[in-house]
Image (cartoon, rainbow, N blue to C red):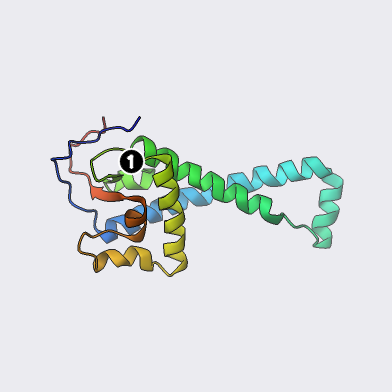
Amino acid sequence: MPRQFHSPEELFEPAPLLRRLLAMLYDGLICIAVVMVVSWAFTMAHAWIIGFDQYIELAEAGEMDSGPGLTFSLVLVLYLFFAYFWTRTGQTLGMQVWRIRVETHYGRSISWTQALIRFLTGIASWLLLGLGYFWMLWDDTSETWPDKASGTQVVRVPPGTKIP
């Protein structure tokens, strides 16, 4: 059930690019920690499955390959991290610090599908050297590619606004 953050009649201004980038920087630091923990857990599970002695031999011989399993695990966990916050409060920890929130155009929390579209489009935007985010500088509605693709918006949260 989507949360109603504010009435559709209330218009919050779009979040400026600098605030978005700073929130991404904060979240990026958290993501580094998440990646480290997941990588450690994956490595320990892999070593436990094949045996620690064989794992050490393969690692010393330079023949250790995690295959697509680690990559898939990391992408999945990072998606779950962002989607959890976006679908519940509309704000990751970095977004809370910079007082911005992702929501639908009607002031509601986004769905898991919208979060997936935002996440994948965000990756594509960064792979294209951030073009998808800098696009908002030329867009009439100040929307990035992830905003447009997912039918969401990132707004600046006025001081004193409480999350219901």
The residue closer to the viewer here, 59 or 152, is 152
Residue 41 appears left or right of 163:
right
Could you classify mark 1 by the number of other residues whose Cα lies within 10 Å: few (under 14), some (14-19), or many (20 or more)?
many
Callout 1 amino acid: Gly
Q: Residue at x 32, y 50 (%)?
A: 151
Instruction: Give x and y (percent) for residue 154.
Output: 28, 50
**Residue 64, quarter of the rendered image:** bottom right
Q: Residue at x 36, y 55 (%)?
A: 149
* The residue positioned farthest toward the left in the image shown: 9
Instruction: Give x and y (percent) for residue 12.
Output: 17, 47
Q: Residue at x 46, y 59 (%)?
A: 123
Instruction: Give x and y (percent) for residue 37.
Output: 59, 44
Q: Quadrant of the N terminus?
A: top left
Residue highlighted by disc 1: 90
Vertical order, 157 against 71 (above or below): above
Instruction: Give x and y (percent) for residue 99.
Output: 26, 46
The residue closer to the viewer here, 118 or 46, is 118
Q: Quadrant of the C terminus?
A: top left
